[in-house]
Image (cartoon, rainbow, N blue to C red):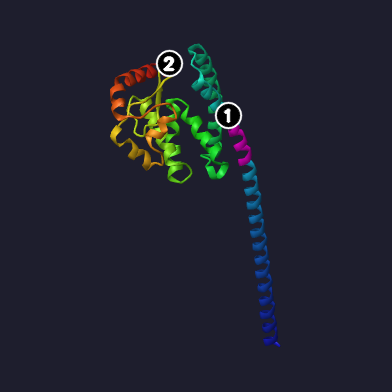
Amino acid sequence: MQWSLKYCTVIILFCYACSSLGSRQNTKQLANDAFHADNRVTANEEISRNKKIAQQLDTIYLMDQKYRLLMMRETNIAKRNVLNIKMESADSSNRIKVTELITRYGWLSAGDIGERAEATIWMVLQHAHLEMHQKYYPIIKNAVAHGKARDWQLAYLEDRIAIETGKPQKYGTQLLQDIDGRYYLAPLYAPDSVNIYRYEVGLGSLTDYLAGFGIAWNLDSYKQELPKIRQLERGNSKKR
């Protein structure tokens, strides 16, 4: 009888253990299902959020480009000055919106919000002032290192910072404009090697790039015009 009680006790304990294990497994499965459900909800919410951000950035893109395109076509100095004031006002508003996005979400990649929307974030920062360029340079550099931004985007910003601090640019992305609206290539760090540097970061040839601004690239002509270019650069630095 004593053996039977012990035997029954073992059976009861075994059944309890199985029941407890099954209960724990069911609980774990329920938790696992809930986790994946939450993830699906989070993913859907993120997609919806990113669509809204992309729409907001599309509006910002149009505002960023509107006055710049008008200024490129306008030859009247007085009208260009009016357009410049409007452009600076639009830029100021755009900067506030873009920096709020970066502060809240970090650097949003093209995979997150689309090519144009991501390019708009970069473009608004490009059109900002030196302090902002220096502030967000590490963020863009980190984004490039993690595949969320592209090498050429960082190259543009590096050139921008160089010109703004009185140094020659490496990649030939920055231009200066005289009072008549004519464009000139800002001073280069190594004119003979500029295309090598450009190809390394995914930029096309300097010849093709400058053609879009009505500049026929010629190294000898560039060197001859360098004194005038440096004078323009000094004039621009006084305005900044």
* Numbered badge on residue 62: 1
Q: Quadrant of residue 15?
A: bottom right
Q: Is residue 87 magenta?
A: no
Mark 1, Cα crowd under 10 Å, few <14 / some 14-19 / many 20+, is few
What is the three-letter code of the residue carrying label 2?
Asp
Q: Secondary structure at mark 1?
A: helix
Question: What residue is drawn where x is 51% and y is 24%?
Answer: 68
- For the residues labelled 1 and 2, the Cα–Cα distance comes to 26 Å
Q: What residue span does the magenta drawing correspond to? A: 50-58
Helix, strand or loop for the magenta stretch, by majority = helix
Question: What is the three-letter code of the residue carrying label 1?
Answer: Leu
With 50 as the anchor, is 222 left or right in this view?
left
Q: Is residue 19 visible?
A: yes
Looking at the image, which is closer to me, 174 or 92?
174
Taking the image as shown, residue 164 lies to the left or right of residue 128, namely: left
Q: Which residue has dot 2 on it?
A: 180
